[in-house]
Image (spheres, grey):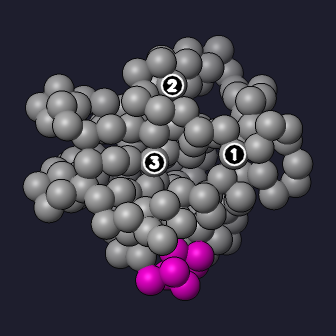
């Protein structure tokens, strides 16, 4: 059952155009003001880490909120650049909890992680610019599960 006080993130790894940071922050602030206190992040490159960093900034103003880092498997960062790995580790170290969805990589591990987050949350914030790939899959899954979706 989805929790009304939880929100997940999904988004493209490659940022094709800049996300609307003001809209992302306003959406987060509005959710927090309406009782959302837990944010699930899939820790992928691109939008996931951008969203996680925004939540960590907001924790300074709203110390009651929590960030849960959800990784598909322990080696999720295997192909990250040195800078991406640095950010990844920093976010995980700053998170309130770490959820490892599978203890080894398999085809579909990322989608299983995304399903896990949607199943835990009543809200989804998405950076989606095309109707294909993992982000589009996750948005479709969230629609099927009747989650409230915000596109930024």
Q: Height in image: 26 above or below 95?
A: below
Q: Height in image: 125 above or below 13?
A: below
The location of residue 68, given as percent across then percent down, is: 45, 39
Please say whether residue 108 is visible from this viewpoint.
Answer: yes
Please say whether residue 30 is visible from this viewpoint.
Answer: no
Q: Which residue is labeled 3 in the image?
A: 40
User: Reading the chain from its start, which is encountered first: label 1 or label 2?
Assistant: 2
Q: Quick one: which residue is furthest to the front in this view?
A: 1
Which part of the image, by quadrant, shows the C terminus? bottom left
**Which corner quadrant of the image does residue 149 belong to?**
bottom left
* Helix, strand or loop for disc 2: helix
Give the residues in magenta. 140-146
Q: Height in image: 91 above or below 4?
A: above
Q: Which residue is labeled 2 in the image?
A: 92
Q: CA distance from mark 2 to mark 3?
A: 12 Å
Q: CA distance from mark 1 to mark 2?
A: 15 Å
Residue drawn at point x = 85 percent, y = 41 percent: 105
Secondary structure character of the magenta stretch overall: helix
* Helix, strand or loop for disc 1: loop
User: Reading the chain from its start, which is encountered first: label 2 or label 3?
Assistant: 3
The location of residue 102, given as percent across then percent down, is: 77, 44
Q: Height in image: 62 above or below 150?
A: above
Q: Dots 2 and 3: beta carbons under 8 Å? A: no
């Amino acid at each position: 059952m989805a929790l009304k006080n939880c929100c997940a993130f999904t988004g493209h790894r490659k940022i094709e155009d800049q996300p609307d940071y003001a809209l992302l922050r306003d959406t987060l602030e509005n959710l927090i003001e309406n009782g959302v206190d837990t944010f699930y992040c899939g820790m992928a490159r691109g939008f996931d880490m951008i969203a996680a960093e925004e939540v960590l900034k907001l924790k300074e103003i709203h110390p009651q909120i929590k960030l849960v880092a959800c990784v598909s498997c322990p080696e999720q960062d295997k192909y990250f650049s040195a800078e991406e790995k640095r950010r990844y580790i920093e976010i995980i170290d700053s998170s309130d909890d770490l959820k490892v969805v599978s203890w080894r990589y398999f085809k579909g591990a990322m989608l299983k992680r995304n399903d896990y987050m949607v199943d835990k949350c009543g809200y989804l914030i998405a950076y989606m610019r095309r109707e294909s790939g993992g982000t589009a899959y996750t948005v479709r899954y969230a629609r099927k599960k009747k989650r409230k979706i915000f596109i930024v």
